[in-house]
Amino acid sequence: MNQPKILFWLSLLIALLAAVYAGVGLFSQGGDGPFSFTTLRGETVEIYGWGVYRLDTAFRAPIFRGTDAVTLFLCVPALIAAALFARRGTLRGRLFLASVLAYFLYNSASLAFGATYNSLLLVYIASVSASLFAFVLAFRSIDLPTLAAHSSAKLPHRWIAVFLFVAGLSLVIWIVDIVGALVEGTVPATLGPYHTEATYTFDLGIILPTAYLAGILVWRRNPLGTLLACITITLNLTVGLVVAGQTIMQVLDGILLSLGEYAAYVTPFVLMSLIAIGLLTSIFRNLSEPTTPRHR
Amino acid sequence: MYTNVTMCFGAAHSVVYVALFSLYAFILCLMSFDLKTLFQDQVPLLENVTSMFIQVMDLGLIVPLCVLSGILLLRRNAWGYLLASVGMKKFLTMGIAVSLMGLNMARVGVPVSAVELGVFPIIALVNLVIVGLLLKNIKD
């Protein structure tokens, strides 16, 4: 089986796995309801008590369920569409597929590392694995000289770079959480009973440097910058949708944050998501297709 | 393992051995996961952590990497040599680290099975031989 075929079937497998874990996460019920729990650090936290996330905190379970709603109703159809577009061998299709796969890698890894152990672990692991290998295949399927040759001079390189720098900067909020806790000799406020915070690692260790690398490269009109920018901006768009979904689910579950917390943790991501839509449209409109679509 | 170590001493067969090693890696990774707990609505031994991050990395990354590098290596694909080299060195360092971890656990009185104390030093030693053969057979 050649690489485009493997990529296509892997993408469909990821869509299926994601539909399973997001569907179960969103609709599963059962359990004894909320209860209080004293963490190793002596804090008392409320545990959600319902469904597959019944052992996650009452703060974090609605976050997972909000993400699941976005994954199931928006991202899974987007992945299937991207796989079908990419199958035609078009440059835009492959770029779209690599970008959407980045979301599934981020999402399934966040659940595998971040959610309290539950019966979906093997599904998360399968999805992480398939997403990682599919992402590598999709990334490698894009020929950088071809991408450079078919990018219009009208592509707003500097606006994209500035957006990426600002998007990267927005993740510094996690450093504030960590350093604040270190200074006070405590742990970040939302850590609860979890042994660590996977989001800090992914966002600060991978997304932030990638955003800055993409920004610098796209400023210099390097085609690798365009590729990384497309992936990072798509991730930014989905993160905005996910944060909106998480917030709605939290409100439905009676979790209300302060206005300051909404301003710090919700508004920037949603606003960035709206700008990301405009930039992605611009990137795709300023790409032309090679006369004969090719597979690598 | 013994059979494949013997096979390693011929350069061509060392490639086959490394490919077969992926099978051992697969079995070892699965050994770290108690599957029946998933189907009986039980929780595996988590102690104080909330998720099984080692199993995520082993089953999600290492196992497919081993299988993929084994297949590519058998086909003499360049990626197979690169991935196998990375995989073998990962298992070499893991073998040494887990061996020392087991010894240290035994030293401070934590129960460690004799199998664990025996298997991982063997993995480290076998890997040492294979990595040596792999590097010896790569020309600059």
Image (cartoon, grey):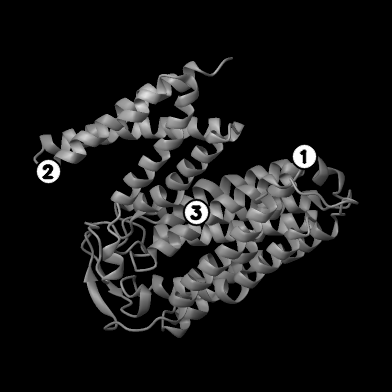
The residue sitting at 37% across, 75% down in the picture is: A52
Looking at the image, residue A194 lies above or below residue A210:
below
The residue sitting at 12% across, 43% down in the picture is: B110
Residue A250's tag is: none
Q: For the residue marked with disc 2, what is the amino acid?
A: Val
- For numbered disc 3, what is the local secondary structure? helix
Front of the two marks 1 and 3:
3
> Residue A203 location in percent, x, y?
51, 53
Q: Quadrant of residue B102?
A: top left
Quadrant position of the C terminus of chain B in the picture:
top right
- For numbered disc 1, what is the local secondary structure? loop
- Evaluate whether label 2 is on the same chain as label 1: no
Asked whether, in this view, residue A217 is left or right of residue B23, the answer is right
For disc 1, the marked residue is A220
For disc 3, the marked residue is A129
- For numbered disc 2, what is the local secondary structure? loop
Q: For the residue marked with disc 1, what is the amino acid?
A: Arg
Tell me the subunit letter for badge 3: A
Asked whether, in this view, residue A99 is left or right of residue A18, the answer is right
Q: For the residue marked with disc 3, what is the amino acid?
A: Ser
The residue sitting at 44% across, 52% down in the picture is: B60
Tell me the subunit letter for badge 2: B
Looking at the image, how many numbered discs can be counted on the residues? 3
Quadrant position of the N terminus of chain B in the picture:
top left
For disc 2, the marked residue is B110
Front of the two marks 2 and 1:
2
Per the model, the C-alpha gap separating discs 1 and 3 is 33 Å
Front of the two marks 2 and 3:
3
- Evaluate whether label 2 is on the same chain as label 3: no
Tell me the subunit letter for badge 1: A
